[in-house]
Image (tube, rainbow, N blue to C red):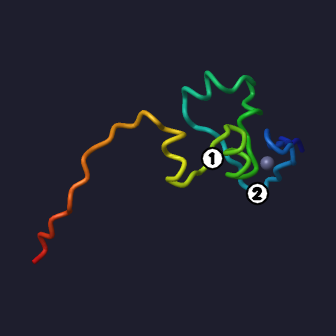
Amino acid sequence: MKKKVVYCAQCHNEITQAEEYWMVEDNFLQVKYFDEQDGSDNLFCSETCLLNHISATSHTFDDLERTHPNLEEIDEYEEEDDLE
Ligand SMILES: [Zn+2]
């Protein structure tokens, strides 16, 4: 019997059939970012490996001015309490 042997494109550990795998479903990224015809570079053992592979990181709002300096700003105003 044949089976497909699957490796994580980030950490290169084998992903067994007892586990789940992660992949990017976005069509633009599949066409423009990933190269392998068989999709083997779009297979990851964990959410962490996928996020590391595409350099996706989380930040606190302290970073916002550095990461997104051109975001539009709106005037702050006091919320009115309508629930009385
Ligand atoms: Zn991995």
Specify whether tag 2 is near ligand 1 (CB below 8 Å): no
Closer mark to the observer between disc 1 and disc 2? 1
Q: Seen in the image, is 60 located left or right of residue 57?
A: left
Q: Seen in the image, is 47 located left or right of residue 25?
A: right
Residue under the point 59% across and 28% down? 29
Q: Seen in the image, is 1 located left or right of residue 60?
A: right
Q: Residue 82: x, y in percent?
A: 11, 69
Q: Is residue 53 above or below residue 76?
A: above
Asked whether 7 or 83 is in front, the reply is 83
Residue under the point 72% across and 23% down? 35
Q: Is residue 5 above or below residue 48?
A: above
Q: Around disc 2, counting alpha carbons within 10 Å, would you say few (fewer than 14), some (14 to 19), or many (20 or more)?
A: few
> How far apart are the alpha carbons under marks 1 and 2?
24 Å
Residue under the point 78% across and 59% down? 18
Specify whether tag 1 is near ligand 1 (CB below 8 Å): no
Q: Residue 61: x, y in percent?
A: 49, 53
Q: Residue 12: x, y in percent?
A: 86, 43
Residue lying farthest to the right in this orientation: 1
- Please name the residue that numbered disc 1 is placed on: 57
Residue under the point 82% across and 50% down? 15
- At label 2, the amino acid type is Glu
